[in-house]
Image: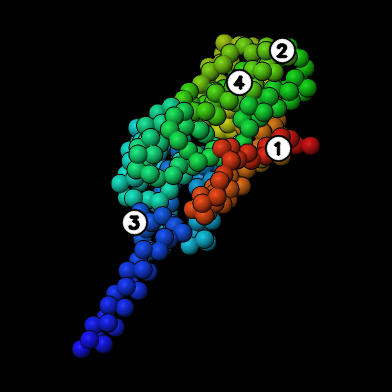
Amino acid sequence: MKNFQIALLSVMLLFLAACSMESPFVNNGSDNEGNIKIGLSISTMENPFFVTLHDTIVKEAEEQGMDIVTVNAQDDASVEISGIEDLIQQQVDILLINPTDSAAVSSAVQSANAADIPVITIDRSADEGEVETLITSDNISGGEMAAEFIAETVGEDANVVELQGIAGASATRERGEGFHNVAEEKLNVLVSQPANFDRTEGLTVMENTLQGYNDIDAVFAHNDEMALGAIEAIKATGKDIVVVGFDGVDDAIAAVEAGELTATVAQQPDLMGQEAINTVQEVFAGNDVDELIPVPLDLKTKE
């Protein structure tokens, strides 16, 4: 009997020792024990750029055996916050956030901080709250690139219309800042109007602008969707106006090749997605990551 009790005690001690071993992953409720459970908040699935970003992240995560839950903010800050709060309630291990509004999303980031859930932001930043890193292109440099191209193509002092993105998005602020860094010295900006990164709004705003101004030489749109909308409005007038977009989505590249869109400052959403999953792995391996992970830009023209 005594030998049996000693054997039983030994088994119990071994069990307790195994349970106390620290896991290399934080598991706040993954569907499969030991897997990292990612919560992904995407700003919209109506824009091809973010569809590519979303699809790449999901593909890369699944290939790495990670679980992933996605919420679509539908370009609405309140929907975005609600979705992220839901992901927190689902006890995801890490949050990947592509913000709709950099200021508004801050409260959701802070909620994640309070729940000890790491946050990575993609393409756009959060104004407040702690994040592991921001994975993005240099939007300021991209705005400067667009303005320099317009000045070289049309000439200095060209009359330019600027179509702005969503007011609260960091990409809007940064692309606008970069554009004006150059435009204030080399171009004449007739008007800057928001079209909220939306193709239909880009069309409408450009139609109204064309009615008010007869001497437009060029348009800089903060994304390709607005640029493609502006092209439709310009076609109806028969005018020859240089249009430069930003993102490098498939529709924009096709329009460049067709000679309709003059140029686009191309980002790489697939590379952003790959970097996001690579960074998740680094975070859970306990490695330090840079506060900013830049993704290169490339100006695409027909030439």
- The alpha-carbon separation of the residues under discs 3 and 1 comes to 40 Å
Residue named by callout 1: 298
Task: Reply above or below: 274 against 65.
Answer: above
Q: Position of residue 75 (x, y in %)?
A: 43, 34
Residue 150 sits in quarter? top right
Q: Quadrant of the C terminus?
A: top right
User: Residue 24, labelled with which disc?
Assistant: none
Name the amino acid type tagged 3. Gly
Q: Furthest residue to the front?
A: 2
Task: Calculate the distance from the C-alpha at mark 2 to the C-alpha at mark 3.
Answer: 55 Å
If the image is split into quadrants, where does the N terminus sit?
bottom left
Of the numbered discs 2 and 1, the one sitting upstream in the chain is 2
- Residue at the spot of label 2: 185
Q: Which residue is mark 4?
A: 177
In this rendering, the answer to whether 281 lies above or below 256 is: below
| Mark 1, secondary structure of its residue | strand
* Numbered disc 2: secondary structure: helix
Looking at the picture, how far across and down is residue 136, in whole percent? 58, 37
Whole-number angstrom distance, CA of label 3 to CA of label 4 = 42 Å
Where is residue 71, by image quadrant? top left
Residue 141 occupies quadrant: top right
Q: Residue at x 58, y 41 (%)?
A: 290
